[in-house]
Image: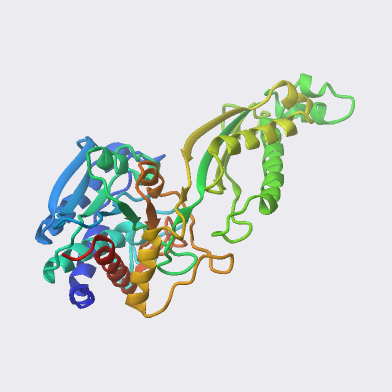
């Protein structure tokens, strides 16, 4: 099997380049032109459909939106074995701001020093290629598995639209006894076997102020002036909330932990801050501020408890400010993405660890603070696990270059990932 995968290396690299050339930016990503992007995800899956069929897979289209179609490939089992599904998404984020890509267009793949550069190469079109390689090698070697193998190539992951992709496939009847999400599982190391991910929350807070002429600022802030009776700067009130949550984040460094994560991993990141008086000109005190945070919390904690802790901390800070005490901010949580937590002792990560040892010749140590095995982003394993399907993460690429200028992936790592996934599928499903 490993030789069959290696023999397809050149074809795999060509397929990755073909997928990168397709602009499959998620059409519902904030700030993009939906009409210009709709259909890109489906185009990637149309390319993969041809590959799936040549690999002997039975293909199925699954969709809630006919312009955004997920693809499922099935290799039937002979019977008597466990089933396994491999999951990956084909949508990408828009190109990162901050300058042109070194090699030109984000959609023009370039190979440098053994890595392919291009938007989506790491996140996660190399994984799509690795998944196909597993199926193609099984076909080439005429290996019949006892249990069924499924490939799920889904849409909508980058904006949390799991109902359109991953859950749509599951609810269409494509379930399995275990799942491997082939997201890039580095860091902490290339091709880490990852049974946990942090929970993610998107918090939006609106702070109201009282606009007045900028020339009245001395009357607002100096002794003897009317103060908040004449104006309140919503930007400055919002800055108080940024500091308050930074204090909570420091506390989290001591109070929030998980044995599979490095110490201090869970954070409250201020990501967006906008304030204005209704016009883009600093001639008034801004009367409204909008602030956004991205929050990572331990997977064993309930999201409602975390939400409550954050809101109570913010409101406690507001009670120390006369204006905010009388005009508390409003809270909104546009996205809640619970974490994944599969025990390392579960048979699925243990099977993957044995498979990876066979491929590399090196044993995989158990998780520890010195050998963390966490996935540092939200991903679809959350929803698979909630559907009763134990899940782990294992795939090529590096999250540190995902969503970044000059995103790239190691081609050797893409091939190695396919070998590990194939070895795991053969043991998990059994060979007839």
Q: Which of the 4 image quarters holds residue 392?
A: bottom left
Q: Residue at x 72, y 38 (%)?
A: 240
Residue at position x 68%, y 29% from top?
285
Picture quadrant of residue 326:
top right
Residue 274 can be seen, yes or no: no
Q: Nearer the viewer, residue 21 or 353?
A: 353
- In the image, residue 332 sits, relative to residue 156, either above or below, namely above
Q: Could you tell me which quadrant the N terminus lies in?
A: bottom left
Residue 399 found in image quarter: bottom left
Q: Is residue 286 left or right of residue 427?
A: right
Q: How is the image coloured?
A: rainbow
Q: Residue 108: x percent and y percent? A: 28, 62
Q: Residue furthest top?
A: 229
Percent coordinates x, y for residue 61 in the rendering = 17, 43
Q: Residue furthest front?
A: 80
Residue 32 vs residue 64: left or right? right
Counting from the top left corner in percent of width and height, residue 250 is at: 70, 50
Compared to 51, does 91 lie above or below? Answer: above
Picture residue at 32% right of the left edge, 53% below the top: 178
- Residue reaching furthest bottom? 361
Say above or below: 306 vs 101: above
Residue at 15% x, 64% y: name it: 432
**Total residue callouts:** 0
Q: Is residue 413 visible?
A: yes
Residue 194: x and y in percent read 44, 60
Closer to us: 73 or 129: 73
């Amino acid at each position: 099997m490993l030789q069959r995968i290696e023999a397809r290396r050149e074809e795999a690299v060509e397929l990755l380049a073909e997928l990168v050339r397709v602009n499959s930016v998620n059409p519902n990503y904030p700030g993009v032109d939906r009409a210009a992007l709709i259909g890109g995800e489906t185009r990637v899956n149309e390319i993969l459909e041809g590959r799936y069929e040549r690999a002997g897979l039975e293909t199925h289209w699954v969709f809630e939106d006919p312009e955004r179609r997920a693809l499922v490939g099935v290799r039937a089992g002979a019977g008597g074995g466990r089933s396994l599904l491999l999951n990956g998404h084909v949508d990408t984020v828009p190109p990162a701001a901050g300058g042109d890509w070194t090699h030109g267009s984000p959609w023009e793949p370039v190979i440098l020093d053994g890595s392919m550069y291009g938007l989506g190469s790491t996140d996660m079109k190399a994984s799509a290629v690795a998944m196909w390689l597993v199926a193609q090698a099984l076909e080439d070697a005429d290996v019949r598995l006892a249990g069924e193998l499924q490939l799920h190539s889904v849409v909508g992951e980058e904006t949390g639209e799991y109902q359109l992709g991953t859950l749509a496939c599951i609810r269409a009847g494509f379930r399995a006894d275990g799942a491997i999400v082939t997201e890039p599982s580095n860091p902490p190391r290339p091709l880490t076997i990852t049974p946990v991910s942090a929970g993610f929350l998107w918090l939006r807070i609106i702070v109201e102020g009282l606009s007045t002429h900028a020339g009245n600022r001395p009357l607002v802030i100096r002794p003897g002036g009317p103060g908040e009776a004449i104006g309140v700067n919503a930007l400055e009130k919002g800055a108080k909330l940024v500091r308050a949550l930074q204090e909570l984040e420091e506390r989290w460094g001591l109070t929030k932990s998980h044995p599979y994560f490095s110490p201090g991993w869970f954070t409250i990141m201020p990501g967006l801050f906008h304030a204005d008086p209704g016009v883009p000109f600093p001639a008034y005190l801004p009367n409204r501020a909008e602030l956004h945070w991205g929050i990572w919390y331990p997977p064993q904690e309930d999201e409602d408890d975390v939400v409550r802790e954050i809101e109570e901390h913010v409101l406690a800070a507001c009670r120390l400010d006369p204006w905010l005490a009388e005009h508390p901010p409003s809270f909104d949580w546009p996205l809640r993405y619970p974490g994944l937590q599969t025990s390392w002792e579960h048979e699925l990560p243990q099977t993957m660890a044995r498979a990876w040892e066979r491929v590399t010749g090196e044993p995989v140590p158990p998780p520890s603070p010195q050998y963390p095995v966490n996935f540092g982003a939200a991903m679809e394993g959350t929803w698979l696990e909630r559907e009763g399907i134990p899940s782990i993460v294992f795939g090529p690429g590096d999250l540190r270059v995902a969503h970044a200028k000059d995103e790239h992936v190691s081609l050797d790592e893409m091939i190695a990932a396919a070998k590990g996934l194939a070895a795991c599928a053969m043991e998990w499903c059994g060979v007839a």
